[in-house]
Amino acid sequence: MKKLFAKFNLPFPGFMLNTELEVPVEGFTVLFGPSGSGKTTFLRCLSGLERAPHGFLKIDDDIWQDEDRGIFLPVNERPIGYVFQDTRLFPHLSVEGNLHYGFNRRVPEKKEVLFNQIVKIMDLGLFLDRRPNKLSGGEKQRVALARALLTRPGLLLMDEPLAALDTKRKREIIPYFQRLQSELRIPIFYVTHSLEEVLQLVDTMLLMEQGKIIAAGPLVEVFSRPEIGAHLGHSLAGSILDTIVDRQDNDFKLTVLKFKNQTLYVPRRDVPIGSRLRVHIRAEDVSLAISPIQDQTSVLNVLAARVLGTSPSLEDECKVEVRLDIGCFLLAAITRKSLEHLNLQPGQNVYAHIKAIRMAHELD
């Protein structure tokens, strides 16, 4: 597995990028954090568009930057593709003309094979003779992404490419990211301040705040840290579960998911049996019981759990966060009064009632 090691210290007026990390170079790596946290600056350092005075960047054994040794690979010599929020398409060229502009000396001789492959993946066959002003926002982004892919990058950098799109257009383009990952397997570093748009895709998550990377690792692992809710915000605080689609309940229009030998029901999703589906359970949507009460509740999703511990909520002084083990980490937010009433103790067996389950790829 390839590894990326980066160390950047870059001062700006009122801001300091101060990052050091080592992460896998595979799959979908998301840089998440509020505006002004340093996400785009870090991405520009990876690309070579920004030059940290004492920076260091290595991918496996390839050193792109080592300022102490006078090494700095310019952006045009780095095997990267870059997709911006602004698609930067040439208005006087057709889609096909814009795509052919993506070819460069890194592309192998069989250009036509590569061109046809990328056009198929991005589903652009019907648009090749159109000009950019005849495309929707989502279609423009697919063209910009295809153009970047035609350079055959070893690393694809994407800076909030969906920020200008409405919810409908975002939902339309997410499957193309999934197709890109499954067919081309190009590692992607993706900047966003709206994690909801890519939760279904993330392999590695980098959480940034005030120029620093405060958490890095697999998505499920990062979400499982009790302190992370303070950085993710109230609406996202909770847990991520990786499930498998077990069957479709056609009578009640539900999709049945399997997770750690337990069962979850969600509103019907048209996905094949056996598919992996990532779900997001917010802490505020989890209630607790100390005995099974399946016959006395409308909640379908009840999971056996064990209490790991409790801590005061940083969002609401009347609540506490209860850390649970359900085969992986689950977070529940309940009132302090409920905690006292149930007398919950570490090691105690309880039942987690999940009032709502959101698909991790769905948007607000």
Image (cartoon, helix red, strand yellow):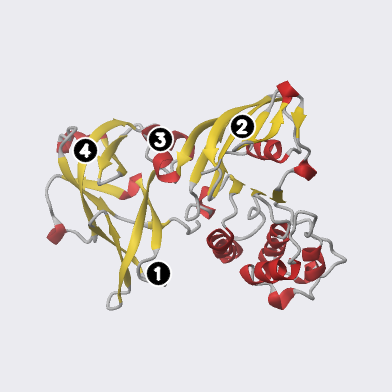
At 59% from the left edge and 60% from the top edge, which residue is drawn?
184
Q: CA distance from mark 2 to mark 1?
A: 40 Å
Q: Would you name the residue on which mark 4 appears?
A: 307
Please report contact status of discs 2 and 4: CB closer than 8 Å, yes or no. no
Q: Which residue is mark 3?
A: 315
- Residue drawn at the location 71% of the way across and 41% of the way down: 47
Q: Tell me which label, 4 or 3, sits earlier in the chain.
A: 4
> Which amino acid type is marked by label 4?
Val
* Amino acid type at mark 2: Ala
Looking at the image, residue 255 sits to the left or right of residue 181; the answer is left
Q: Which callout, 3 or 2, points at the residue further toward the start of the chain?
A: 2
Cα–Cα span, label 2 and label 4 = 38 Å
Q: Which residue is mark 2?
A: 6
In the rendered structure, the answer to whether residue 12 lies left or right of residue 218 reads right
Residue 269: assigned label: 1
Could you say which is closer to the camera, residue 4 or residue 348? 4
**How far apart are labels 4 and 3 at the CA level?**
21 Å
Q: Are discs 3 and 1 less than 8 Å apart at CB?
A: no
Residue 110 against residue 328 in the figure, above or below: below
Question: Does label 1 or label 4 sit earlier along the sequence?
Answer: 1
Label 2, secondary structure: give it: strand
Q: Residue at x 85, y 67 (%)?
A: 93
Q: Secondary structure at mark 4?
A: strand
Q: Callout 3: helix, strand or loop?
A: loop
